[in-house]
Amino acid sequence: MRKMTWAALTLATMVAFPLVAQTRDQAKAFVKQAVEFAKKNPKEKFTEEVSGPKGQFHFNKGQNNDLYIFVYDLEGKVVAHGVRRELVGVNRWASKDPDGKAWIQDWTKLVKEKGNGWIEYKELNPAQGNKVMKKASFVELFNGMVIGAGIYE
């Protein structure tokens, strides 16, 4: 009986206070979901699903979803962004993290060579008041776009 009570209490706590932190598996699955959506829809609809505040790939703070999709072209221009819509159209090729890592260039090279993979760098975390944190992003190349999502560690 004691084990059942503990299990019920644990489950109730998880439902009432869901874990917000995401895992690498969740980020990768989210990118795969976005790529599938991009394959089945016109580019304009896909980018609106990413950048539009009601889109399924947009950041929804407070809804147990720290994940968002970002989309860049192969020259470093932001095509769509699930949290910072003001970046759409901005070329960030020369951007570097606080340690001097040119992460956009690095992930572009990665997807050109391997099709997809993980990259680590530091970036602003919108769920933590834009605090700079270590981030691991899964990125995948589709139709000239680098589609990615990351987790903050």
Image (cartoon, grey):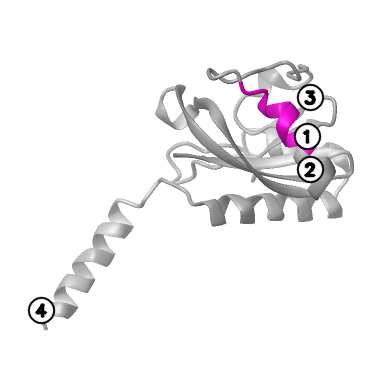
Q: Which residue in the protein does label 3 denote?
A: 76
Task: Give the image location of residue 107, x and y in percent.
Answer: 72, 35
Q: Nearer the viewer, mark 1 or mark 3?
A: 1
The segment highlighted magenta reads 101-109
Identity, as a three-letter code, of the amino acid under mark 3: Gly
Q: Which residue is mark 2?
A: 111
Question: Which amino acid type is marked by label 4?
Answer: Arg
Q: Nearer the viewer, mark 4 or mark 3?
A: 3
Which residue is found at the position 42% from the left and 23% from the top?
A: 129
Residues tagged 2 and 1 counted as in contact (Cβ below 8 A): yes
Magenta-span inclusion, residue 138: no
The mark that comes first in sequence, 1 or 3, is: 3
Mark closer to the chain start, 4 or 2: 4
Q: In the rendered view, does 97 fall on the left or right side of 49?
A: left
**Which x, y percent locates residue 104?**
71, 28
Sequence-first tag of 2 and 3: 3
Q: Nearer the viewer, mark 4 or mark 2?
A: 2
Mark 1 sits on what residue? 108
